[in-house]
């Protein structure tokens, strides 16, 4: 047996005090298959080195610039250099970094939203195609085992014909002006760094992705109403979008960052004509399957039979709660497997490895731009379009 | 001490097999202060007598026609004849019966929606004013003690400035064509008996009323999207309405009769800028009060201090669950007290006795007609108007 | 059709400020089949009349003494006099009142515990047999529809062979010395009025009854540990009893009146070798049916199929919560039906009408005396015996 | 800044198919501070190498015998050799491995129960003292942030004087004879590998530890009743233990491996005379704080203020559920910090680093032996003693 090695990861962003960078690293660490080998954690060389060293990296692989990192890493022997880069910066940097990485021959796993604008996402698709590399997008919530089982239940007809989808993603961390003090808040309410949307771009897009992932249907039309509830906000911090899906189903997407008392309330309900499912991220190991003629079934992680995708996303026996980091780790694990398949010349599509990719990137950016554009319209319904817009991003 | 007597009630509708009539009677019975003394339970004299006798009434006070009942009862001595009539028929009969009762000198407690059309509700207001009698509307869900406490919390500023309201009323009893077999279903899907709306008229109006009752604010604008999900339905069986309130708050009202697996899911969330409340009818003895800086408070019926309206709506100690019939009984109890005050010449407004009345009747009918009308418009937002319309009631 | 009449009830106890008397009356009122016609609400004639008049009774049927009431009522025509008496006094009076009522030819529906001592319960059985009348005991919690369904599931083998029973009844209303201020508390902590036990006599006996009712098995041995947690208490306010059942199952019964934060937490779990059930009185419309190989089933009142006993104990559609008063009313309704059967010469056993009776009275009193006696023993296990004891009732 | 290095871990046990070994590795991996550098994963050299290589270890550091591992590792440079060993074998091997490791100069982090017998735990204490090394015991459930907050609430008097403790740990994975097929089950029901107890040794001891950890009190007397519910079992698979604590509190400990439908139901309730807490492992991010005069508080991970121990045990914002692996990782993180302190000559007691240690090892083994011994006694109560016994371990 030839000694196998861990998949080697570099990181851009995620220095000291960055919340999401630490989350990505824990997700990458959990299963012991991925190794952080380098990073450009900050544009300040000293800070980047300090961050890297606290992560046990040698100073030589702590870079101040991602361009430098890609160049230097590319010079290393194939068995040493990083294989993929994890991008955990604010939104406006996602595209240039991803583009540079792909062009330098590295796979990319990016935080969402994929890019700053829909146009960038479309451009990224071209770059990706040319590069021949892999691209993954961390729509974390797809990583939960019971979400995979929910998708399976819909796909196998357990719900009958889908009639209605209700998806909600509510938080309260931007409920007041004072909440903008944190670093994470500052860039999200800033059009120059977040893009045309705050709420829809940060969390609404997760909800939209989850609805499409589970139902296997595409949003085809929307009626959007975005709000900037807190005085002085330039971007939306709340909104509701009525939906039509291409399978005929109706839907409602509610999202808010000012819903005080809501922690991280992502909930999906899908109603068919035979049964419905109900899942909440804050109790992710429970999936409710209901009909109007029989007792409700409470499907619990680890109890009973599951589809392979759900089964392989579980790590511990029933009753040992798995949570957000495990869901996140599932995205990383699947992407690491995808890279190994790529390197062995095996089939390695995102679909095969259940990793959100460039299609989700484009649809997500279109969703964000559409909600902002349609919200400003006096007309109720608009077709979902994948067409870069010139909306200003200022709500109302 | 002069021997007091129970308040005497007559009933129109509610014969054998009628669901809601039995509910009204249990609500009236519970506290032992109201006595059923007569009824026109069916337009078939034999059936009406059969129903009345099974309710222990003498045959002489079981009437085949409500007009006959009002005439005959009016001839009885003041201390024997019925004091108020409970109207539990299908919607299209509410107005003529209420009008006749008021004109014959009887108080009216009516099931909702108040009338068949908004115009009738406006006419009813005139009749009521002329009659000098009392009028109550059984918006049952206002009767729950924790709803009264929720109203109190909003009114006393515990939530800060109200920013967002999410109210949902979902059921599944009309999820399929086959579900129309029951008597209760048949008239609700029939425009000739239900009016312009099925879902909004039957349950959406409860949700709208609850939101206005608790927040103390009025809906001022709406964006409506009603659906007839089940093939062949002439009226809506599902819908979503985006809301603006006259205090600046945004809102979402979701209602459905086809949301399979939903039993009777009425849930209200009100988000202020300081705290939020969350209440679900299916667990009515729990009220959640949440902020983003402190632990959540779970307010439980009977534990701690309550406003007088909530306190007087509780019957048993904490942990002894009170439910739907008790909430319903609270409407009846308050109406009975209102009648006693009326008879003693004391102040007896609906507001004083916390009984929904003609104002709620009019706003409810306006809500129903508005949702249907606005749903048919291509324009997103419309002002809430109290203006009788000519909409056909056929969804989409 | 001959006009039927409501079943006529008298009441002993339950005057102003008495909690449980009002509960019994609401339970009797709810369905409109029972009429309160007389009462000896207080031993003070003026108070009894005052109480009775506030309940709309004529002064002539408000008695100061139960003996007088039974004598006077017996003189009334058969179609007017009370048919059964509801006994809602403190424990020490249950037996003499029940005895007198039975001997005067009235049926008895008694609050629990049935008597002051086991000997009295045994004596009562003799009186009852001689009288030929009916006797019911308000073990309220048996009245919940899902408890009846739980009993059905056990009886029909859905759980397999029963292995373990865990029943808990915890409250906190006597958690501190200060809590003894209320009238209801005063007599319950007083050996002269409550008997040998406070906690086991007041609520532990409900838990024991519930376990036996649902499993259909009898407690056959016990290891008891009662505590008087609050300083100065003469009777137990907390305790645990390990159980053996005559079907081989093990059990645990926990009960407390000092478990601060517990409202009225009666919960029953029954584990078979194939499945288990779990029911909590504070969410009484949910019954969990679990196995270790399949998804959990959540059985909800009104959803799916039920055994006839459960079905007839439900009043409103799914999702309209039914609670404590409805459960209590089910005992009253069944007892009223039993009386009608009695009067028509039909089979009218307690078992037929699902009404707890003299057998439960005796077993309950034996349970109470056994727990006190066994708790004082240094030996771990004792057989459950139906043998009047001379224990002092002072815990520890 | 001198480049710091990860803490280096070896492992004994935990080869392919071993459940708990994988869990320990994920717990060690999560935060990126610990590196697995060697292991004796199996006594079969080929298997050990295979397991190690699949974990990316060089063949040279995959050992077939732990004695060999300790010897070889000790020869490596100080900066390369393992610093601590994680012991994840069946129970009977814990002591000899821990002893050998300590004597070879390595710290030990052991799965529980610490040893095969109490005598071994006492011997281990001597070895530990002589060695001067560190010893940790993975009582995982102590690692949950809200358990640390619960301990803090008790210690700071938020509950008042502690009156009652109810702790339960129920599972169903050994509910039937067929369940013994798995490797994990086989050794747990075997007295030669598990010791004198199955249920109490595997999970009851967790419950006892949790109760003592949170209350800060010691169990001082017990009344035990263990059962072998499944036919043919030589060891207990179920049991209840009544408790007295040295602060005067009463307690109940219930544990079962045959409670069908229970996944991994570890729940702790502590009742004081002012308030109570309630925590369930299956919803670990919620801690209920209840009184009998005010609304319940629901303390949620990440919302509000926490004691330092709880705060440092949280990784992600409120509403992003953390679970079992994160709790386990907290034990590993704290032990890694303890090792660093040790190496820097700083104070490094287990108490300082909140790591369960040799005291918990001894008390745990005493608990296990006591429950088995006392269960066989006809006498109800026995003092908790730390005195090695000669019980056979066969229940009943």
Image: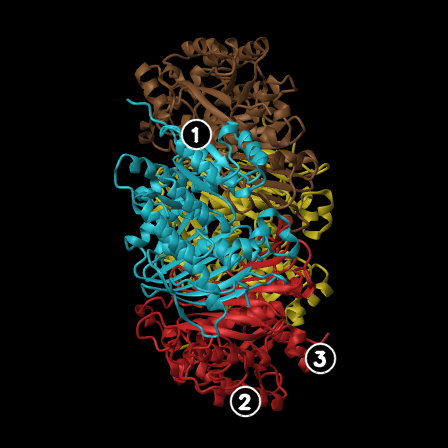
Chain colours: A brown, B yellow, C red, D cyan
Q: Chain for mark 1?
A: A
Q: Chain for mark 3?
A: C
Question: Mark 2, residues whose alpha carbon is within 10 Å: few (<14), some, or many (≥20)?
Answer: some
Question: Mark 3, residues whose alpha carbon is within 10 Å: few (<14), some, or many (≥20)?
Answer: few
Answer above or below: position of A89 versus B253: above
- Residue drawn at 51 percent across, 32 percent down: D62
Looking at the rendered image, the quarter that the N terminus of chain B falls into is bottom left
Disc 3 marks which residue? C347
Picture quadrant of residue B309: bottom left
Q: Chain for mark 2?
A: C
- Residue drawn at 46 percent across, 76 percent down: C201
Describe residue C58's horizontal placement relative to residue C211 as left or right: left
Disc 2 marks which residue? C123
Describe residue C120's horizontal placement relative to residue B341 as left or right: right
Instruction: Point out which mark residue C153 bears.
Output: none
CA distance for labels 2 and 1: 72 Å
Give SS at disc 3. Answer: loop
Picture quadrant of residue B255: top right
- The mark tally for this picture is 3
Give SS at disc 2. Answer: helix
Residue B274 in sight in this render? yes
Disc 1 marks which residue? A23
Ranked by sequence position, the earlier of labels 3 and 2 is 2
CA distance for labels 3 and 2: 24 Å
Judged by depth in the image, the label closer to the viewer, 1 or 3, is 1
Give SS at disc 1. Answer: helix
Residue D30 in sight in this render? no
């Amino acid at each position: 047996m030839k000694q196998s090695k861990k998949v080697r990861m570099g990181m851009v962003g995620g220095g000291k005090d960055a919340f999401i960078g630490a989350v990505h690293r824990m997700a990458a660490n959990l299963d012991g298959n991925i190794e952080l080998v380098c990073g450009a954690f900050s544009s300040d060389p000293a800070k980047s080195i300090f961050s890297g060293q606290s992560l046990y990296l040698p100073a030589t692989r702590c870079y101040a610039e991602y361009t430098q990192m890609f160049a230097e890493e590319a010079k290393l022997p194939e068995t040493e250099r990083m294989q993929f880069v994890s991008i955990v910066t604010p939104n406006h940097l996602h595209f240039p970094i991803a583009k540079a990485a792909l062009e330098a021959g590295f796979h990319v796993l990016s935080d969402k939203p994929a890019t700053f604008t829909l146009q960038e996402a479309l451009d990224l698709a071209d770059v990706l195609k040319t590069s021949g590399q892999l691209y993954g997008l961390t729509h974390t919530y797809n990583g939960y085992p019971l979400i995979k089982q929910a998708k399976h239940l819909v796909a196998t007809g357990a719900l009958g014909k889908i009639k209605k989808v209700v998806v909600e993603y509510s938080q309260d961390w931007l409920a007041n002006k004072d909440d903008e003090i944190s670093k994470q808040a500052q860039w999200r309410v800033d059009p120059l760094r977040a893009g045309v949307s705050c709420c829809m771009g940060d969390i609404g897009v997760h909800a939209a992705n989850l609805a499409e992932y589970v139902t296997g249907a595409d949003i085809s039309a929307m009626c959007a109403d975005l709000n900037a509830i807190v005085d002085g906000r330039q971007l939306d911090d709340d909104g509701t979008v009525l939906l039509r899906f291409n399978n005929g189903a109706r839907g409602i997407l509610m999202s808010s960052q000012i819903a005080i008392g809501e922690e991280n309330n992502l909930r999906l309900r899908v109603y068919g004509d035979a049964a419905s499912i109900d899942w909440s991220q804050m109790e992710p190991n429970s999936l409710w399957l209901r009909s109007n003629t029989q007792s409700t079934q409470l499907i619990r992680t680890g109890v009973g039979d599951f589809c392979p995708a759900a089964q392989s996303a579980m790590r511990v026996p029933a009753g040992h709660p798995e949570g957000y980091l495990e869901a996140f780790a599932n995205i990383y694990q699947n992407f690491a497997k995808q890279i190994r398949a790529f390197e062995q010349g095996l089939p390695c599509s995102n679909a095969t490895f259940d990793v959100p990719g460039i299609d989700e990137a484009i649809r997500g950016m279109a969703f964000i731009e559409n909600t902002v554009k349609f919200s400003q319209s006096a007309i109720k319904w608009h077709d979902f379009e994948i067409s870069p817009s010139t909306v200003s991003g200022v709500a109302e």
